[in-house]
Amino acid sequence: MVPDVSTGDPTRLLCLNCARRTVSPRIVSKYAGLNGYLKFRGSFTNSVKLSFARMDGIVGDNLPMEAYKTEGWWSNLPTNVHAKAWLDAGWNVEEVNLKEGHVVFRKVKELQPTGSRRRRASRSEIEKPFTPVRVRIPKPRTPSKTKVSKLYARIKNLERQRTSMPVYRGSFRPKTKHEKRLFKPDEKPSQ
């Protein structure tokens, strides 16, 4: 028994095997992403057509050159690490087209759900196929009555200002308040 590795608490003891699992990272296969993707797709479809570029994205790395050149790389042999990824997910390679660069996977078997007993019971109860979540379109918010009345008051004030200003034809410009104070109305300024 050793102290808790994550917190260092000596009062909480762990067995060496549990401590090793806590400290050491899980070893993940290069093709674990493909395995997870096919397991996900298996819940609502029986065949998947993937381009090589899409496969590169799912795997997170480029496929080996042999995958692009030979159909033998895509064989369903469980001894191959890459084939084990889709076989463990319950899929087989049905068709490979090297010229167009795509692969068609076909679901072979239903996987038994893994996890706790509670999870298994809930999954066995669900018999409906996958249905996407309904998207709710947000309703446009109506502004409050206060905001509406303020905007209406501003618009009315602007209209009043426009109507109170006299409109003059031609190039005649009215005198500003400053000019009116400087000169008498009958006199013209001397230049």
Image: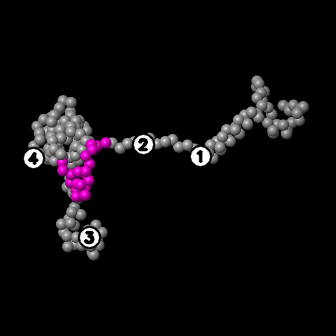
Magenta span of residues: 111-131
Of discs 2 and 4, which sits in the foreground? 2
State the mark number for residue 79: 4
Q: Quadrant of residue 12?
A: bottom left
Kindly report the distance in space between the C-alpha atoms of the residues bearing marks 1 and 4: 68 Å
Query: Sequence-wise, which precedes: disc 2 or disc 3?
Result: 3
The foreground one among 172 and 130 is: 130
Kindly report the distance in space between the C-alpha atoms of the residues bearing marks 2 and 4: 48 Å
Q: Is residue 10 above or below residue 114?
A: below
Of discs 3 and 1, which sits in the foreground? 1
Label 4 Cα crowd, 10 Å radius (few <14 / some 14-19 / many 20+): few
Classify mark 2: helix, strand or loop. Answer: loop
| Residue annotated with mark 1 | 144
Query: Sequence-wise, which precedes: disc 2 or disc 1?
Result: 2
| Residue annotated with mark 3 | 4
Q: Is residue 83 above or below residue 96?
A: below
The foreground one among 8 and 78 is: 78
State the mark number for residue 136: 2
Query: Sequence-wise, which precedes: disc 3 or disc 1?
Result: 3
Q: Is residue 112 above or below residue 25?
A: above
Q: Quadrant of residue 116?
A: bottom left
